[in-house]
Amino acid sequence: MAPSAHERAFVSSVLQEDLDEADDTPASIEVRRLAIVSAHHGERLDRALAQQVPEFSRSYLQQLVAAGAVCVNHQILRKPSLRVKVGDCIELEMRPTQESQAFRAENIALDVIYEDPHLMVVNKPAGLVVHPAPGNWSGTLLNALLGRDASAAQVPRAGIVHRLDKDTSGLMVVARTRAAMDVLVRMIGMRQVHRNYLAIAQGRWQGPAEREENAAIGRDPRNRLRMAVVDLTRQAGKTARTDLCLVEQGPAHCLVRCTLHTGRTHQIRVHMAHIGLPLVGDVLYGGTPDLGLSRQALHAFHLRFDHPVEGRPLSFDACLPPDMQSALRAAGLQGM
């Protein structure tokens, strides 16, 4: 329902500010004054705000409500579920939140091993989070990409098309244009981007040197922080396939090459734990800190795909980082 002429006039009067009044509001805070019209009568506060301030997400507005940045009829309210009424006057302080400021440029060094106008390939170190999220709103690969090239802000997620876990090192392809990104996303979905990893596992390999682990993965019902192999007839999950190949057997550890055919969360870590070979340092999935490693011993060493614009084949390799090389020596392994 469109607002009536009376309602529009009321909104205008509420929004009219006294320009002669001194404003001591910090420069980072913008105050919006709104009025609830009949079209939003009875709606939740957060939903009504999202309708009237469409340039901001509903989750961001919920954060502002919870932070006490929203007044309804001059009273601070902290419940997004509150129902509003026609004629309610709202004052909204557009305070920056960690999430709203996450997509900013930061001066973080990157190991770029290939770059052209359409894409780049980076060798991500262990410990670098790929994308801002709760607990890691800054210092991420996305922030580094924005800091390295301002034009990355014009590409969704600064061109990130796939991820590595925080403590997994290795190769990632990043789009530099929207056209390249669209093609790369489609190629990943069609399994046309080939990714190979090296893992140091605890325990001795059993059986043939090559095996295919074809086991669905879903959220672990006993621990929501973990993923697990699940039975799709009884639990939610997605099919997952990893090809595993023994590279070298040591006295108490083994070096394994892992080839992804799907890209499920923690896929290699879950599949390796499922066959009784948890990764060194992967405490979430049964591994223990060992061989001088406190992070999971997993490195994306090989990346192969056709150029998304030019069509030519591209292939990249990244040596094991120093911490995994030291771990190999401590395990009595030579490596590839």
Image (spheres, rainbow, N blue to C red):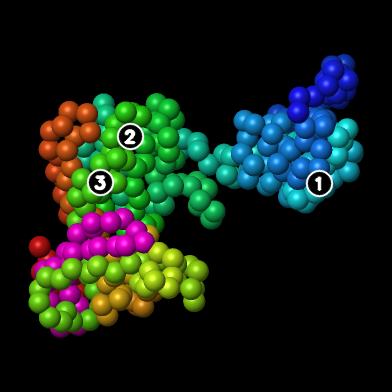
* Disc 3 secondary structure class: loop
Q: Is residue 299 left or right of residue 43?
A: left
Mark 1 is surrounded, within 10 Å at the Cα level, by few (under 14), some (14 to 19) or many (20 or more) other residues, namely: some
Dividing the picture into quadrants, the one containing residue 22 is top right
- In this rendering, does residue 25 appear at all? no
Q: Is residue 253 magenta?
A: yes
Q: Position of residue 297 (x, y in %)?
A: 28, 66
Tell me what residue is drawn at x 29 percent, y 46 percent.
189
Task: Answer above or below: position of 328 versus 262.
Answer: below
Q: CA distance from mark 2 to mark 1?
A: 41 Å
Residue type beneath disc 2: Asp
Q: Which residues are magenta?
A: 238-264
Location of residue 142 in the rendering, given as x and y in whole percent from the top left corner: 42, 41
Say which amino acid is labelled 1: Arg
- Residue carrying label 1: 83
Looking at the figure, which quarter contains the C terminus? bottom left
Mark 2 or mark 1, whichever is nearer to me? 1
| Circle 1 SS class | loop
Residue at the disc numbered 3: 190
Q: What crowding class fits label 3: few (fewer than 14 Cα within 10 Å), some (14-19), or many (20 or more)?
A: few
Q: Nearer the viewer, residue 144 or 199?
A: 199
Marks 3 and 1 sit apart, C-alpha to C-alpha, by 46 Å
- Mark 2 highlights which residue? 182
**Mark 2 or mark 3, which is nearer to you?**
3
Q: Quadrant of the N terminus?
A: top right
Q: Is residue 161 visible?
A: yes
**How crowded is the residue under tag 2: few (<14 C-alpha within 10 Å), some, or many (20+)?**
some
* Magenta span: chief secondary structure: strand
